[in-house]
């Protein structure tokens, strides 16, 4: 198993969940050469990762030309193993482009779009579980020990550390990044409520709220509403430093506040406390992995409901989350986590 190709192209959160599998493989086989097929956006998160030897970009926005380009790149390489971690047709087609005796994917019950037809081997069927554990099933099939679960996602080099310190140098309080929006409107919280939370973070908890994310139209709209409504203007870092800059900001946080989106999982991977707001997707499947669950606001289930792990989505529930519920979790952070998880770096005072 000298040459391995990973097919997981999109969704930042899923890319984060692949990293413990990558770490386990490299821990068992240090000389393994890993090629990862990624779309340009999430590729920014792992570009430079010390365990990723090569990234092949698949630009699906280019249509047929994108498929032709990745086909040429993959046909020029041979692998001992291909791991297809996505269950859709596009991933199946790209897996079919690869040359390898073993193409490992999900079992037929979990593979969609007949994705299982493009693999030669499949992991056994398994009851629904957290996405992170689902990916670690591949390590089990390969006979690789996946514990401890480690991501290796923090700032990697002097340039990233310098960017992080430069960002922090203008702030004289511990930072509390707020992830203002997600990839789906149904998973977003109301920006006017974020503005109330931001004021409380400043006045009641001694934290500097920092707005983080990209600069999509919905994120820019949320930023505008929060900045207009907050009595103490938060710092906005939307779009600053790309995904690696976001990692630097989250890594330095005292506390992060996030709905169900990629930065939530980045924060857990960095071992920083996070107040998560989840209502659309099942928290038992996509919530913070094995830590900070007591800081989660769960509006997915009804009061007292012991819902099963599933892929069922429940729209229109994010407005159920109140400002007071979020601040109650922030108070729990202060009493249960703040002393044990101090900011990793002391910001330089402003002049």
Image: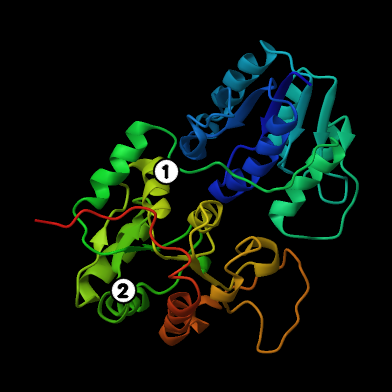
Instruction: Where is residue 253? Give x, y as percent.
Output: 38, 59
User: Which residue in the structure is indicated by mark 2?
Assistant: 198
Residue linked to disc 1:
243
Which residue sits at x=62%, y=29%?
36
Judging depth in this view, the residue of 208 and 77 nearest the camera is 208
Q: Secondary structure at mark 2?
A: helix
Query: Is 146 placed above or below 258 here?
Result: above
* Residue sticking out furthest to the front: 339
Please indicate, yes or no, whether residue 282 appears anywhere in the rendered image.
no
131 sits to left or right of 273: right
Q: Label 1: how many residues lie within 10 Å, few (<14), some (14-19) or many (20+)?
A: many
Q: Is residue 83 left or right of residue 342?
A: right
Q: Quadrant of residue 303?
A: bottom right
Is any atom of residue 272 visible in this view?
Answer: yes
Mark 1 residue element = helix
Percent x, y for residue 61?
A: 50, 34
């Amino acid at each position: 198993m000298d040459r391995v190709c990973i097919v997981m192209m999109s969704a930042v959160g899923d890319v984060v969940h692949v990293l413990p599998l990558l770490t386990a493989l490299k821990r068992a086989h240090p000389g393994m050469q890993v090629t990862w097929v990624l779309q340009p956006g999430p590729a920014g998160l792992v570009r430079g990762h010390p365990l990723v030897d090569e990234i092949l970009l698949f630009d699906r926005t280019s249509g047929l030309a994108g498929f032709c380009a990745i086909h040429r790149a993959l046909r020029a390489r041979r692998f001992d193993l291909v791991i297809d971690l996505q269950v859709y047709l596009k991933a199946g087609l790209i897996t079919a482009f690869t040359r390898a005796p073993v193409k490992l994917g999900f079992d037929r019950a979990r593979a969609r779009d007949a994705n299982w037809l493009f693999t030669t081997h499949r992991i056994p069927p398994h009851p629904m579980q957290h996405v992170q554990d689902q990916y670690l099933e591949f390590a089990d099939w390969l006979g690789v020990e996946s514990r401890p679960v480690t991501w290796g996602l923090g700032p990697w080099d002097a340039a990233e550390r310098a960017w992080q310190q430069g960002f922090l140098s203008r702030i004289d309080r511990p930072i509390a990044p707020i992830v203002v929006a997600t990839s789906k409107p149904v998973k977003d919280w109301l920006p006017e409520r974020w503005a109330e939370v931001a004021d409380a973070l400043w006045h009641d908890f001694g934290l500097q709220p920092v707005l983080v994310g990209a600069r999509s139209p919905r994120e820019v709209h949320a930023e505008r509403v929060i900045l207009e409504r907050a009595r103490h203007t938060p710092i906005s870092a939307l779009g600053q430093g790309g995904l690696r800059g976001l990692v630097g900001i989250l890594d330095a946080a005292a506390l992060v506040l996030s709905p169900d989106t990629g930065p939530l999982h980045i924060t857990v991977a960095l071992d920083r406390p996070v107040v998560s707001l989840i209502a659309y997707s099942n928290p038992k499947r996509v919530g913070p992995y094995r830590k900070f669950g007591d800081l989660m606001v769960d509006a997915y289930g009804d009061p007292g409901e012991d819902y099963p792990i599933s892929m069922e989505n429940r729209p229109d529930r994010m407005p159920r989350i109140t400002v007071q519920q979020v601040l109650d979790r922030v108070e729990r952070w202060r009493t249960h986590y703040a002393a044990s998880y101090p900011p990793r770096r002391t910001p330089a005072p402003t002049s």
